[in-house]
Amino acid sequence: MKIIVCVKQVPDTSGKVAVNPDGTLNRASMAAIINPDDKNAVEAALTLKEETGAEVVIVSMGPPPAEGMLREILAMGADRAVLVSGREFGGSDTFATSQIIAAAINTIGVDKEDIILCGRQAIDGDTAQVGPQIAEKLGLPQVSYVAEIKKEGDSLICKRMLEDGYMTIKVKTPCLLTCIKELNTPRYMSVPGIVDCYSKPLEIFDFNKLKDDPLIELDTIGLKGSPTNIFKSFTPPQKGAGMMLEGADKETCQKLAGILAGKHII
């Protein structure tokens, strides 16, 4: 049994976001971190590994420096990692990215009992599209916004979060789940894990490795194969300091009402 976890290295959006002239993010100018929701998917995989003895395989698409992120996840307890990297993949939107990652998963192989886990969404795009698109391209059942996972024979019992509550879904493996932060609390790297992480296998899948998969064509990957067109990207201006009114007396209330009326809010 394998658990394949799709992770992404994202820019730390707590700082200033830099944008290239073509509308893509200038990732080289920003600090890179593991996408937070993907950490919950990693923790879910490691928990299932402890329960079932499954092998945990991490898959990420990105530039060569993303190897450092993958080593960090190997130090958390994953067994092996695959970095999908090549110039042909650069500039891919969610459609093209899901094509490439699905091809990489095909190359790894998906057996009857295997599970694919993804984070709900990435903080650099916030689309929540790649996970479901991978499932569609692999022809697998999927459950999104998963807040609880229990393995039961050849099936998983998942609690899926809705806007106004939860629903329980039973899905047979192989399947794909997208995980939310309410699912768990990701663990830290351990000292033995850090020592061992560089002895664990990390394989590079480039264009030549994946080109024979029917999902991989130059017209459907990279910037050329991305149907999404970005009209404009920019860093929103910082908001100025707000106005604070203290007190609960009649005079303060009248002053507040006057300000709101002046702005045509009331």
Image (cartoon, rainbow, N blue to C red):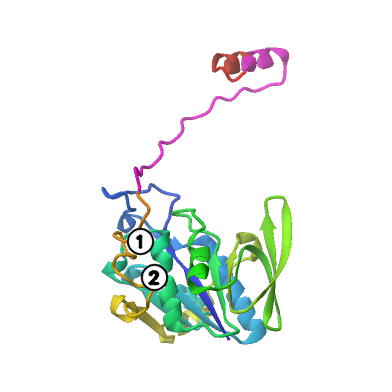
Whether the magenta-drawn stretch holds residue 76 is answered as no
Q: Residue at left 68%, top 12%?
A: 251
User: Which quadrant: the N terminus?
Assistant: bottom right
On the picture, is 24 further left or further right than 154?
A: left
User: Which quadrant: the C terminus?
Assistant: top right
Q: Main secondary structure of the magenta part?
A: loop
Residue 100 is labelled as 2
User: Which image quadrant for residue 71?
Assistant: bottom left
Q: Residues within 10 Å of mark 1 (few under 14, many from 20)?
A: many
On the picture, is 65 further left or further right than 239?
A: left
Q: Is residue 69 visible?
A: no
Q: Nearer the viewer, residue 79 or 111?
A: 111
Q: Nearer the viewer, residue 265 or 184?
A: 265
Q: Which amino acid type is shown beneath numbered disc 2?
A: Ile
Comes first in the chain, label 1 or label 2: 1
Q: Nearer the viewer, residue 41 or 210?
A: 210
Q: Could you tell me residue 124's position as x and y percent?
A: 44, 54
Circles 1 and 2, Cβ within 8 Å, touching? The answer is: yes
Whether 107 is drawn above or below 217: the answer is: below
Q: Residue at left 51%, top 82%?
A: 110
User: Which image quadrant for residue 145?
Assistant: bottom right
Q: Which amino acid type is shown beneath numbered disc 1?
A: Ser
Residue 92 is labelled as 1
Q: Could you tell me residue 211's position as x and y percent?
A: 31, 77
Q: Residue at left 59%, top 20%?
A: 265
